[in-house]
């Protein structure tokens, strides 16, 4: 049973109970691994990023005051870390992996044929980074609208408009590349 | 009155996770044309939303390696030790071991927690200690928190030596087979798998697997055989599969690897 909320645990970490970061790691490392994997094809790099994320949270533990939801705070740090990593990759001239890299996507036995998925991937990549981020946070990360809104610094209403617009844009780009399945 | 844009958005988004537009969820709107147009737009968004889910199917079911867990534990233990050194009076009731029951199995939990408390100290002695010798007459230096896993550290140390260097490969093999610290053995395996191929990898892995008692290291050895398709190691896996003391996790992994190797 998880008797303590993430918020309470993080506040306790901030007060010096560093070992409780282990509980938070247990709860969230898988979702954060997937968060990084969606934009990076290197599994080991993603595992390192997850470790870095939790260590960075440990480093900034006193900055968490409990006003924001823990999940929002964690994703904010993760987004910053991902941006740092991408910048580092660009500086080093290494390939920055595209979103939802192709070789990792489902092959046979899925409802939508592979060629449709390829078109959808292309449509997703063609979106603006902001629209793509909004869709990825709401759809793939399973975050509530209010959490994503807090994360992006906008109202829930404004976020919904952005999601709606991004979905229309995605569909439009998809349809223009062929027929909708 | 015409439907406000925010109400249209609200209604469309409310349809996203549904199974379809049922009669009970008829679109709002003054005219039939409005309602039809809104329903069409909602259906389009709903299809896009579902297709996005399929796009993410594979990654949504992917899990990180257990190695990440143990590496983080080691780093957390290091941070706790450093913090304890700075704040010796701070209470640690219910401390570090309080969270391990959520690990995958009891045996694994006990082993990895023990590793966590000792690994960094041992690791530093074996790899980093020359950099951390206190200056004469000065205060002891406290190392900066590392954001890298043990294998990354070792990889960084070896980066300048050159891939496949026989002496390096030999040292890594010896560390994998006989180092007393499981974290060092794990790190040695990770780097050896990058530095070496074929028989250069099969020999050390076979010897290590024959005497490895740490469940996490054993699991990684098995996994490496599968990932690198070391078919010569299939025999030792077959033998290991009959070991009654083997944990279920390793047994399942052996089954997966044997399938992958076609044995």
Image (spheres, grey):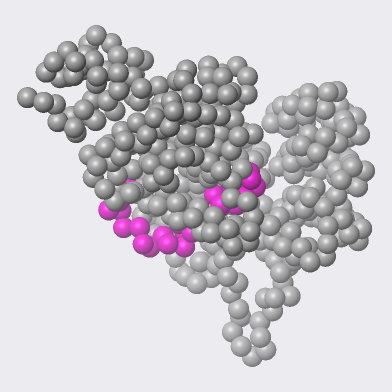
Q: Specify the farthest residue to the top.
A: B23
Between B182 and B59, the one nearer to me in the picture: B59
Q: Quadrant of the N terminus of chain B?
A: top left
Point out residue A43 in the picture as x, y percentages from the top left corner. 63, 44
Image point (61%, 43%), residue name: A41
- Magenta stretch: includes residue A114: no
Percent from the top left, x then y, of residue A77?
43, 54
| Residue found at x 27% / y 53% | A67
Vertically, is B24 above or below B234?
above
Q: Can residue A15 be seen in the rendering of this structure?
A: no
**Measuring 40% from the left and 28% from the top, which residue is drawn there?**
A171
- Tell me the quarter of the image containing the C terminus of chain B: top right
Which sits in the foreground, A109 or B173? A109
| A62 to B59, vertically: above or below | below
Decide if residue A22 is on the left or right side of residue B21.
right
Residue B66 lies left or right of residue B174; in this view the side is: left
């Amino acid at each position: 049973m998880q008797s303590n909320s993430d918020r309470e645990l993080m506040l306790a970490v901030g007060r010096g109970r560093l070992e409780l970061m282990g509980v938070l790691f247990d709860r969230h490392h898988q979702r954060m691994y997937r968060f990084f994997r969606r934009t990076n094809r290197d599994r080991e790099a993603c595992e390192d990023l997850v470790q870095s994320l939790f260590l960075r949270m440990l480093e900034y533990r006193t900055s968490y005051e409990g006003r924001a939801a823990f999940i929002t705070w964690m994703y904010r740090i993760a987004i910053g870390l991902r941006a740092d990593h991408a910048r580092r990759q660009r500086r080093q001239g290494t390939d920055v992996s595209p979103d939802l890299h192709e070789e990792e996507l489902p092959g046979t036995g899925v409802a939508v044929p592979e060629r449709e998925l390829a078109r959808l991937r292309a449509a997703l990549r063609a979106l603006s980074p902001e629209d793509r981020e909004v869709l990825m946070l709401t759809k793939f990360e399973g975050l509530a609208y209010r959490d994503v809104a807090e994360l992006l610094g906008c109202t829930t209403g404004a976020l919904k408009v952005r999601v709606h617009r991004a979905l229309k844009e995605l569909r439009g780009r998809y349809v223009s590349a062929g027929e909708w399945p | 009155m015409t439907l406000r844009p925010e109400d249209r958005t609200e209604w469309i988004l409310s349809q996203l996770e549904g199974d379809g537009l049922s009669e009970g969820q008829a679109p709002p709107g003054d005219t039939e044309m409005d309602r039809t147009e809104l329903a069409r737009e909602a259906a389009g968004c709903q299809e896009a939303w579902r297709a996005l889910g399929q796009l993410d199917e594979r990654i949504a079911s992917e899990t990180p390696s257990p190695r990440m867990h143990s590496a983080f534990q080691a780093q957390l233990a290091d941070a706790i030790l450093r913090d304890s050194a700075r704040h010796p009076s701070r209470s640690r009731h219910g401390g570090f071991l309080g969270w391990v029951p959520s690990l995958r199995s009891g045996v694994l939990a006990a082993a990895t927690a023990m590793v966590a408390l000792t690994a960094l100290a041992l690791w530093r002695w074996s790899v980093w200690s020359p950099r951390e010798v206190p200056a004469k007459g000065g205060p002891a230096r406290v190392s900066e928190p590392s954001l890298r896993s043990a294998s990354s550290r070792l990889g960084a140390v070896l980066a300048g030596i050159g891939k496949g260097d026989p002496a390096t490969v030999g040292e890594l093999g010896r560390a994998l087979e006989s180092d007393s610290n499981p974290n060092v053995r794990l790190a040695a395996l990770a780097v050896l798998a990058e530095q070496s191929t074929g028989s250069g990898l099969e020999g050390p892995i076979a010897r290590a697997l024959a005497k490895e008692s740490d469940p996490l290291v054993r699991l990684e050895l098995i996994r490496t055989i599968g990932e690198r398709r070391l078919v010569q190691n299939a025999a030792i896996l077959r033998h290991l599969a009959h070991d009654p003391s083997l944990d279920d996790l390793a047994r399942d992994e052996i089954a997966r690897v044997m399938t992958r190797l076609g044995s």
